[in-house]
């Protein structure tokens, strides 16, 4: 296999130095996206009918997951011949080192439950339970589904588009335009000040006590560093100097890529905007430990990179409530 004809399999973990906990949705999946097969209809047809091929259904951002006898949770996959056929909504996701090909089928509903423990789950739940391989397959399929759903019409001429390249292109049959999946960059940053305190904020719609890093979308014509500085100033009134990239995280809700930073404040007075951020505070490590342990502050939860950025500053896994 030549290096120019395939995407590389993500064999190495992109985990920042000093980070003990993996960033959800980013662990090496062991699946090569094998993009060079996407336009090869004969290869795709052969792969689809191969007995080792595995298929799962994605519907509205959800998949079926199931618990195994040995206590793991896995994506429910079947051979292609057992899968409900919808040729026009088939996504080729890649192959693994054993030559197994993986496909997702986009459907309006998930298949009926196969047994009592199989259940529907979105990425926020499944991302914490599934193996890196299954998470990698799921996040790819969910991202494609979100993009397909929102790009059924040509943005150039307004006519209907059709799926192509095994789910990775939408083509306009009227004007010939090819549309590729879009990814919207967003920045998420842990701001620290001269005393090495961390700035955490509470979004307006979050429950009382839930604090996390600041975040926002990159605007047109803006570098990501400029975006970090603008967002922090808009949301908290704090000015930022040096900006240091840490890691990224796919965030298909519906189509973002989170770019994680450490940002160094050059001012410390807080002035929240009140629209996105309701409250923001500086925390020393001791403040944070006490607030998390007492339950006064709820740590960021779930799959977001936010907790990993805070952990990187904190220097060890985040403390949990002691009661
Ligand atoms: Zn068109």
Image (spheres, rainbow, N blue to C red):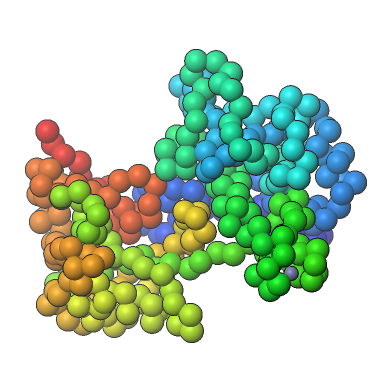
Image-quadrant location for residue 179: bottom right
Find residue 289 and report its horizontal and vertical position in percent. Answer: 14, 50
Which is nearer the eye, 307 or 157? 157
The answer to whether residue 223 is above or below residue 42 is below
Which is nearer the eye, 296 or 147? 147
Left or right relative to 66: residue 176: right
Find residue 123 and report its horizontal and vertical position in percent. Answer: 47, 42
Find residue 48 and report its horizontal and vertical position in percent. Answer: 80, 37
Outermost residue, right side: 42
Residue located 12% across and 43% down the image = 295
For ligand 1, which image quadrant applies? bottom right
The answer to whether residue 205 is above or below residue 49 is below
| Residue 134 in sight from this viewpoint | no
The answer to whether residue 70 is above or below residue 140 is above
Residue located 29% across and 83% down the image = 241
Which is nearer the eye, 217 or 268? 217
Left or right relative to 204: residue 181: right
Left or right relative to 169: residue 143: left
**Quadrant that contains the N terminus:** bottom right
Q: How many marks?
A: 0
Residue located 58% across and 57% down the image = 150
Residue located 90% across and 46% down the image = 42
**Quadrant that contains the C terminus:** top left
Which is nearer the eye, 190 or 123? 123
| Residue 138 in sight from this viewpoint | yes
């Amino acid at each position: 296999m030549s290096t120019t004809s395939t995407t590389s399999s993500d064999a190495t973990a992109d985990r920042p130095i000093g980070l003990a906990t993996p960033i959800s949705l980013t662990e090496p999946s062991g699946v090569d996206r094998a993009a060079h097969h996407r336009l090869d209809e004969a290869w795709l047809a052969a792969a689809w009918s191969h007995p080792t091929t595995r298929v799962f259904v994605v519907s509205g951002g959800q998949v079926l997951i199931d618990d195994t006898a040995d206590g793991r949770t896995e994506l429910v996959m079947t051979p292609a011949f057992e899968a409900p056929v919808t040729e026009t909504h088939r996504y080729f996701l890649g192959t693994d080192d054993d030559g197994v090909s993986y496909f997702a089928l986009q459907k309006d509903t998930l298949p009926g439950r196969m047994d009592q423990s199989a259940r529907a789950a979105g990425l926020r739940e499944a991302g914490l339970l599934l193996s890196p391989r299954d998470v990698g397959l799921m996040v790819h399929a969910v991202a494609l589904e979100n993009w397909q759903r929102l790009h059924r019409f040509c943005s150039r001429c307004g006519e209907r588009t059709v799926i192509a390249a095994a789910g990775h292109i939408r083509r306009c049959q009227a004007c010939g335009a090819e549309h590729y999946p879009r990814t919207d960059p967003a920045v998420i940053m842990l701001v620290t000040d001269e005393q090495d305190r961390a700035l955490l904020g509470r979004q307006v719609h979050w429950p009382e006590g839930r604090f996390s890093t600041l975040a926002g979308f990159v605007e047109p014509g803006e570098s990501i560093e400029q975006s970090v500085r603008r967002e922090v100033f808009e949301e908290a009134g704090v000015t930022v100097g040096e900006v240091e990239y840490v890691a990224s995280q796919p965030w298909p809700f519906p189509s973002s890529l989170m770019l994680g930073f450490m940002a160094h404040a050059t001012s410390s007075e807080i002035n929240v905007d009140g629209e996105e951020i309701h409250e923001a505070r500086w925390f020393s490590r001791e403040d944070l430990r006490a607030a998390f342990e007492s339950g006064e502050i709820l740590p960021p939860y779930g799959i977001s990179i936010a907790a990993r950025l805070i952990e990187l500053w904190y220097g060890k896994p985040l403390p949990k409530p002691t009661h």
